[in-house]
Image (tube, rainbow, N blue to C red):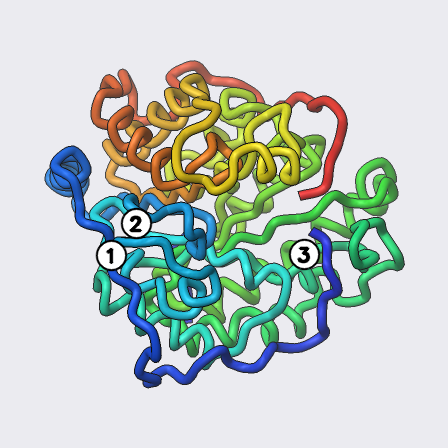
């Protein structure tokens, strides 16, 4: 098949299926009643860009979303197991970032069960899946601290990519896979500063990208997300273009702000957009989680990031391409509320003078951020 376009102990193989694909749910999660503003935003987005825009959140099992996504507060395990259908019925939520796959590889039956739930909620729903850390982290990490413990022998290993990632996704999600994201976790220095290490990284990544291109469903995108900004250079852009892969716009404190990453998007233009708005700059995950839980409303609005993202989205969609944007609760305090405000900003964004994210040409050069932190 050909396509276009925190630390915890990680087991070496797929985990058992959470439920069978045809299992009748033992609990029912009711969707929240939609308000007039949300319905109007969703209708306007569909009228303008059809099914090419997929907005959503990172994961979905948050009781604090009661009133926004759920009719009432439900226990997180119930939402995790049976909440995806109700989530997919929300007028604006057309995708979700399946982050659990990063921590443990999922099997085809689990993917198929999730696809069945989402399909009942919305046939046009698509998944953004985060590839397993078993494949994308160069080191094995200590439980709890996340400190590097040993080199990871499966890092960008083709057999691991096929068995723990591509095959289960193709069999379980099939055409409901919108994008697979390879988030390269922070790399040891030898991969970054040693020319031989950088060359080896590109060889490994190119081999995996070629394999994924042939093994995944035809319409699936593969995107590479960074946690080391020095990797965002012309060589990486050329590698991604050669394999029909995308640069994932990863908005995270380890990376430059959205404006600072536009050179990579321009280097790969034209094409689809994959963006994961993970964490507000200046925050750490635990800090934001503790301050902003239960994620029931915006706690720290970030209008500058929202405006840049709306501008990039508008250029992408107006040029006839597709876009997948997922937002974490740690971006502004409540992912569903962030989705709603981004939808409004997108509809208000002026049309780009050209069909690119920015009309000004620029070399691929992404500045180095401040202190590093692990995702």
Q: Is 321 placed above or below 119 here?
A: above
**Mark 3 or mark 2, which is nearer the start of the sequence?**
2
- Tell me the quadrant of the picture where the C terminus can be found: top right
Residue 325's tag is: none
Which residue: 59% across, 25% down? 281
Q: Is 64 placed above or below 372 here?
A: below
Q: Nearer the viewer, mark 2 or mark 3?
A: 2
Q: Secondary structure at mark 3?
A: helix
Picture coordinates of residue 127 (x, y %)?
39, 58
Q: Secondary structure at mark 1?
A: loop
Picture coordinates of residue 202 (x, y %)?
70, 49
Front in this rendered view, residue 89 or 274: 89
Is the C-beta separation of discs 1 and 2 under 8 Å? yes
Q: CA distance from mark 1 to mark 3?
A: 35 Å
Q: Give the crowd class for mark 2: few <14, some 14-19, many >=20 residues within 10 Å.
A: many
Which residue: 74% across, 50% down? 201
Q: CA distance from mark 2 to mark 3?
A: 32 Å
Residue underneath mark 3: 136
Residue underneath mark 1: 31
Q: Is 180 placed above or below 191 here?
A: below
**Mark 2 or mark 1, which is nearer the start of the sequence?**
1
Which residue: 30% across, 49% down? 69
Q: Give the crowd class for mark 1: few <14, some 14-19, many >=20 residues within 10 Å.
A: many
Picture coordinates of residue 362 (x, y %)?
52, 18
Which residue: 78% across, 44% down? 198
Q: Is residue 328 visible?
A: no
Q: Is 36 placed above or below 358 here?
A: below
- Tell me the quadrant of the picture where the N terminus can be found: bottom left
Q: Give the crowd class for mark 3: few <14, some 14-19, many >=20 residues within 10 Å.
A: many
Residue underneath mark 2: 69
The answer to which image quadrant residue 302 occupies is top left
């Amino acid at each position: 098949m050909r396509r276009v376009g925190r630390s915890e102990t990680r087991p070496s193989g797929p985990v058992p299926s959470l439920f069978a694909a045809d299992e009748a749910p033992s609990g029912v999660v009711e969707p929240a009643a939609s308000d007039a503003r949300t319905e109007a935003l969703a209708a306007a987005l569909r009228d303008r860009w059809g099914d090419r825009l997929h907005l959503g959140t990172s994961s979905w099992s948050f009781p604090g979303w009661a009133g926004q996504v759920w009719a009432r507060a439900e226990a997180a395990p119930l939402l995790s197991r049976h909440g995806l259908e109700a989530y997919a019925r929300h007028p604006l939520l057309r995708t979700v970032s399946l982050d659990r796959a990063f921590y443990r590889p999922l099997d085809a039956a689990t993917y198929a069960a999730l696809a069945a739930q989402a399909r009942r909620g919305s046939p046009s729903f698509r998944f953004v899946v985060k590839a397993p850390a078993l494949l994308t982290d160069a080191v094995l990490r200590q439980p709890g601290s996340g400190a590097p413990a040993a080199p990871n022998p499966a890092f960008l290993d083709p057999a691991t990519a096929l068995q723990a990632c591509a095959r289960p996704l193709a069999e379980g999600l099939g055409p409901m896979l919108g994008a697979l994201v390879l988030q390269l976790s922070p790399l040891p220095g030898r991969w970054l500063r040693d020319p031989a290490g950088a060359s080896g990284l590109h060889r490994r990544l190119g081999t995996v990208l070629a394999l994924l291109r042939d093994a995944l469903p035809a319409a699936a995108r593969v995107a590479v997300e960074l946690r080391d900004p020095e990797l965002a250079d012309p060589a990486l852009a050329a590698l991604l273009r050669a394999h029909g892969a995308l640069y994932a716009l990863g908005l995270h404190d380890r990376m430059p702000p959205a404006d600072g990453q536009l050179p990579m998007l321009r280097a790969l233009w034209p094409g689809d957009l994959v963006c994961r708005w993970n964490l507000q700059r200046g925050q750490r995950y635990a800090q934001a989680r503790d301050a902003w839980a239960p994620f029931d409303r915006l706690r720290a609005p970030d209008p500058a990031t929202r405006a840049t993202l709306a501008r990039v989205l508008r250029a992408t969609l107006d040029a006839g391409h597709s876009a997948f944007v997922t937002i974490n609760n740690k971006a502004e305090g409540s992912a569903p509320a962030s989705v709603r405000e981004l939808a409004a900003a997108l509809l208000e964004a002026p049309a780009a003078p050209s069909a690119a994210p920015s009309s000004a040409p620029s070399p691929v050069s992404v500045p180095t951020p401040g202190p590093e932190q692990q995702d």
